[in-house]
């Protein structure tokens, strides 16, 4: 059992009081603490990994081989009651024999930890600690005590219980002259660090090494300011990013006279990433590299560990299992063993990303941050042979290499990607997947001023097999998505904006505010691409749009952001915009032509006439209204869960293809108005989208469709939700009667 009816708590009044006294005295402050300090050395043994083994001795061989492949010698092993007689003792002995530096984390099971105030339980703990130290104490780097003590449902400790357990370990490690580390607080919750260390100081039992599991997982990506410290509105003002949190925890260590600070466990679980982004494995790899680089830049940590080495959720290696087979107790608290069969193991992308970061920065001197905390990260490390720049952006953003360096300097550099592959050609862009540029040591490198992300430009970095190619020609700027430089050149030539002329209404797919037409696809003459150009600007739009990106860029951004979040849309090919265009019409968005059978709008009009089925002429088969509502509700729920607010979700902008008798494929078009969040879309914006798409659907259909949608988020169709639909219906009716279209119809009537 991991829980009891009344959970023990570490957040007691003495803890709160001591922490508040520290914080209110101004000691939890570092001027410009969100920026890394300059000119400090990254330890040679900076990066480590949490390890475990299994009953079969072959698992020991496998883990050792993987550690050798990673090139790290620092490991952390969880060791609990019964492990002296289990495979863990065998594995620990093997690690010692192979000359690994072991942080041995002594874990008390929950049922024992919650009863540490009893003399009987204390005696069991004393015997365990003494036995472990007698057998292995002289051979390990340090002993760590504490298991995510600020998570009461995992750890089990009371304050007094933890202090008693600590006293036993402190006395024993002092006698054996072994480093003691703790208290293993998890996340950034310094009230616990301050309070516990203050209590330990009073007892003259401070650790030699202060430990805190410095996660960034809860803020979605390593560079983000932590909204959970003081909520979203204060996150940017107070600048609690990973650098600042690491530096503040180091300051707490120093203020209590503790020389060393480490992070024993941190990771990104793939399944959590996939709540917003489909590329969970690739994003874990990006985050692993970025997390290690930022912690190295902070200068605050002696060591940082990834945990666990092998696990399908958070490991650098997948064990071939699935979530239902994950242990009942989180591995951040107790990584007890490796599960699964060796034949099913495989490397996540994060394995090579981790390995590459370790090889680049361990033992290097961190020179300075060239750019940081702005969405564009550039960090300068120096080794005995090279000056190394590690570059990346926050998710979905891009910077152009030519806006950072002189091309002459770039030509002298060697480029290595996130996974350690030396690139034969220098990339033109920087995105969320880190790259390393290497120059000979002390090479003079010029950095341009006003470094920043490419303004208002988004990309989806992990579209398999495709790359982004900036387009700069004769006053035009744009971006082309292609599988090679040759294909990009072909697209740039055949679809050059100078050659794109919008057709007359009779030859266009649509011709109103925007002209939309189809052209032969230069990559495959049997296919087509769709081109969109604004051709009519109403005065108020002409004024307001001067403060926005071009419509083509907005369409591109919306499409790539939807794809980045796993939402089907017409696949982007390119966009072009004329620089300094005062007309706002000289811009083109190009995407793959979508071969749709119909739109959701057509289906909803059909169902609104009390039809129970919609017939597709292509396959001469039909789908029921119920199946349509269910599949569309699932698609739109996924869109909103990914953080997308479409803002133009009319029925005509959701195209439908029938893939089988009962399966529909939805695809969004007209993406220029979409907005995106780093969290699921708020409910008020979801309702706004849904009211728009349901405008042509009868109320019986609306209620059924909305019931299916709202069930996904545990809500019901209330009067408040219905009111939003009534208000939108009124708005549409009013615009049709008194808006531009209504007035135009009235004038045409008088003309007749």
Image: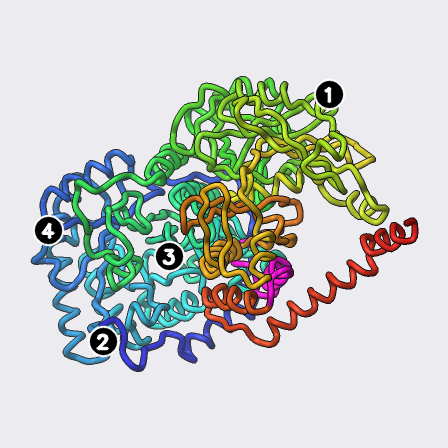
| Dot 4 or dot 2, earlier in sequence | 4
Q: CA distance from mark 3 to mark 2?
A: 23 Å
| Dot 1 or dot 3, earlier in sequence | 3
| Dot 3 or dot 4, earlier in sequence | 4
Q: Look at mark 2 in the image and give the residue it sits on.
A: 116
| Dot 1 or dot 2, earlier in sequence | 2
Q: Is residue 494 magenta?
A: no
Q: Look at mark 1 in the image and give the residue it sits on.
A: 474
Q: Look at mark 4 in the image and give the residue it sits on.
A: 55
Given this view, does label 3 or label 2 mark the residue nearer the observer? 3
Query: Pointer 3 and pointer 2: residues touching (CB < 8 Å)?
Result: no
The structure residue drawn at horizontal position 61% and vertical position 48%, both measured from the top left corner, is 653
Residue extent of the magenta highlight: 677-698
Q: Look at mark 3 in the image and give the residue it sits on.
A: 213
* Element marked by disc 2: loop
| Dot 1 or dot 4, earlier in sequence | 4
Vertical side of 502 occupied by 87: above or below: below
* Element marked by disc 3: strand
* Element marked by disc 4: loop
Query: Pointer 1 and pointer 2: residues touching (CB < 8 Å)?
Result: no
Q: CA distance from mark 3 to mark 4?
A: 28 Å
Query: Pointer 4 and pointer 2: residues touching (CB < 8 Å)?
Result: no
């Amino acid at each position: 059992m991991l829980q009891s009816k009344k959970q023990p708590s570490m957040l007691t009044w003495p803890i709160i009081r001591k922490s508040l006294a520290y914080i209110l005295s101004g000691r939890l402050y570092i001027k410009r603490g969100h920026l890394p300090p300059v000119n400090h050395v990254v330890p040679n043994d900076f990066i480590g990994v949490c390890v475990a083994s299994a009953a079969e001795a072959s698992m020991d061989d496998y883990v050792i081989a993987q550690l050798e492949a990673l090139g790290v010698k620092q490991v952390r092993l969880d060791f609990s009651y019964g492990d002296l007689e289990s495979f863990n003792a065998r594995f620990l002995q093997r690690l010692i024999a192979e000359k690994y530096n072991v942080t041995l984390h002594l874990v008390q099971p929950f049922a024992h930890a919650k009863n540490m105030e009893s003399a009987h339980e204390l005696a069991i703990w004393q015997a365990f600690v003494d036995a472990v130290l007698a057998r292995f104490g002289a051979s390990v780097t340090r002993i760590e005590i504490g298991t995510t003590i600020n998570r009461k449902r995992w750890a089990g400790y009371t304050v007094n219980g933890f202090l008693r357990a600590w006293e036993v370990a402190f006395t024993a490690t002092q006698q054996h002259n072994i480093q003691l580390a703790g208290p293993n607080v998890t996340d950034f919750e310094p009230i616990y660090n301050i309070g516990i260390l203050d209590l330990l100081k009073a007892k003259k039992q401070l650790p030699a090494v202060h430990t805190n599991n410095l996660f960034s997982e809860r803020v979605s990506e390593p560079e983000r300011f932590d909204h959970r410290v003081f909520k979203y509105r204060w996150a940017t003002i107070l600048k609690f990013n990973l650098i600042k949190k690491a530096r503040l925890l180091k300051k707490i260590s120093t203020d209590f006279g503790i020389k060393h600070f480490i992070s024993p466990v941190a990771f990104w679980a793939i399944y959590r990433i996939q709540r917003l982004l489909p590329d969970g494995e690739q994003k874990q790899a990006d985050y692993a590299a970025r997390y290690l680089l930022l912690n190295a830049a902070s200068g605050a940590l002696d060591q940082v560990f990834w945990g666990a080495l092998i696990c399908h959720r958070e490991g650098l290696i997948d064990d071939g299992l699935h979530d239902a087979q994950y242990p009942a107790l989180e591995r951040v608290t107790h990584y007890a063993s490796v599960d699964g069969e060796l034949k099913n193991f495989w490397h996540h992308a994060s394995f090579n990303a981790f390995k590459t970061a370790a090889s680049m920065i361990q033992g290097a001197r961190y020179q300075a941050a060239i750019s940081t905390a702005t969405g564009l990260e550039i960090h300068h490390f120096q080794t005995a042979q090279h000056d190394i720049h590690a570059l990346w952006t926050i998710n979905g953003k891009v910077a152009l290499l030519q806006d950072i360096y002189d091309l002459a300097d770039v030509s002298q550099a060697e480029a290595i990607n996130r996974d350690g592959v030396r690139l034969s050609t220098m990339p033109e862009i920087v995105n969320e997947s880190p790259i390393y540029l290497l120059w000979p040591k002390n090479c003079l490198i010029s950095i341009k001023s006003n470094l920043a992300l490419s303004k208002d430009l988004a990309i989806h970095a992990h579209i398999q097999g495709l790359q982004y190619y900036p387009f700069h020609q004769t006053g035009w700027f744009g971006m082309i998505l292609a599988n090679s430089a040759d294909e990009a050149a072909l697209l740039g030539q055949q679809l050059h904006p100078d050659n794109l002329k919008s057709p007359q209404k009779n030859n266009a797919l649509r011709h109103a505010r925007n002209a939309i037409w189809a052209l032969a696809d230069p990559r495959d003459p049997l296919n087509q691409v769709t081109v969109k150009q604004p051709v009519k600007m109403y005065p108020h739009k002409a004024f307001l749009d001067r403060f926005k990106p071009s419509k083509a860029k907005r369409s591109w951004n919306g499409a790539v952001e939807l794809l980045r979040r796993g939402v089907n849309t017409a696949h982007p090919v390119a966009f072009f915009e004329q620089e300094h265009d005062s007309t706002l019409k000289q811009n083109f968005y190009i995407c793959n032509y979508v071969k749709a059978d119909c739109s959701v709008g057509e289906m909803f009009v059909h169902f609104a006439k009390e039809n129970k089925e919609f017939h597709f002429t292509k396959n001469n088969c039909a789908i029921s209204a119920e199946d349509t509502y269910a599949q569309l509700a699932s698609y739109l729920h996924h869109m909103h869960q990914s953080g997308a607010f479409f803002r133009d979700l009319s029925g005509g902008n959701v195209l439908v293809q029938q893939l089988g008798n009962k399966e529909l494929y939805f695809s969004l078009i007209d993406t220029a108005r979409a907005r995106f969040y780093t969290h699921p879309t708020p409910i008020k914006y979801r309702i706004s989208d849904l009211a728009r798409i349901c405008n042509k659907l009868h109320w019986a259909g609306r209620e059924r469709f909305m019931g299916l949608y709202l069930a996904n988020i545990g809500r019901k169709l209330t009067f408040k939700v219905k009111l939003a639909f009534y208000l939108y219906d009124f708005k549409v009716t009013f615009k049709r009667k008194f808006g531009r279209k209504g007035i135009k119809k009235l004038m045409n009537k008088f003309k007749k």
